[in-house]
Image (cartoon, grey):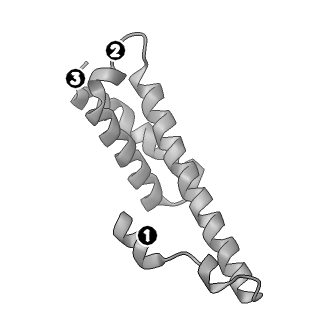
Amino acid sequence: MEFAEFFERTAPGLVRMCFLTTLDREAAADAAQEALSRAWRDCARVGEPPNDPAAWTRTVALNLCRNRWRRLVRQSRLAARAYTDEVRADELPDLDLQRALR
């Protein structure tokens, strides 16, 4: 199967699944796009039998959604601790460094 056909068949359902996981349209579209980009990059390995490229792509997309959720939880916990003065300045994330690493 050509990747364009795989994309047309898989993308709408992948975005819906990501939306149900994140409840955020933009985050869902980003996760689906990244998962499909990785599927394109690794299509020779992913598309070989007995692999199921659709299952692989769904797993990647769900992992991206989970990572987003974990990041949001971690940031909210740090913010909550900062308001209670329990966190030291060196425990706060370096946002400039995080942006540079993306």
C-alpha gap between disc 1 and disc 2: 36 Å
Q: In this figure, which residue is indicated by the disc labeled 1?
A: 98
Give the mark nearer the N terminus: 3 vs 2. Answer: 3
Q: Quadrant of residue 80?
A: bottom right
Left or right of residue 11: residue 28? right
Residue 41: percent from left, percent from top: 27, 35
Q: Callout 3, which amino acid?
A: Glu
Local packing at callout 2 (Cα closer than 10 Å; few below 14, some 14-19, many 20+) is few
3 and 2 marks in contact (CB < 8 Å): no
Q: Callout 2, which amino acid?
A: Glu
Farthest-out residue, front: 90
C-alpha gap between disc 3 and disc 2: 13 Å
Farthest-out residue, top: 49
Camera-side mark, 3 or 2: 2
Residue 19: percent from left, percent from top: 52, 51
Q: In this figure, which residue is indicated by the disc labeled 2?
A: 48
Q: Callout 1, which amino acid?
A: Gln
Q: In this figure, which residue is indicated by the disc labeled 3?
A: 2
Residue at disc 3, secondary structure: loop
Q: Residue 17: tell me if it is visible.
A: no
Q: Nearer the viewer, residue 17 or 101?
A: 101
Q: Quadrant of residue 46?
A: top left
Give the mark nearer the N terminus: 1 vs 3. Answer: 3
Left or right of residue 14: residue 47? left
Residue appearing at x 27%, y 34% in the figure: 40
Residue 15: percent from left, percent from top: 44, 46
Image quarter hosting the N terminus: top left
C-alpha gap between disc 1 and disc 3: 37 Å
1 and 3 marks in contact (CB < 8 Å): no
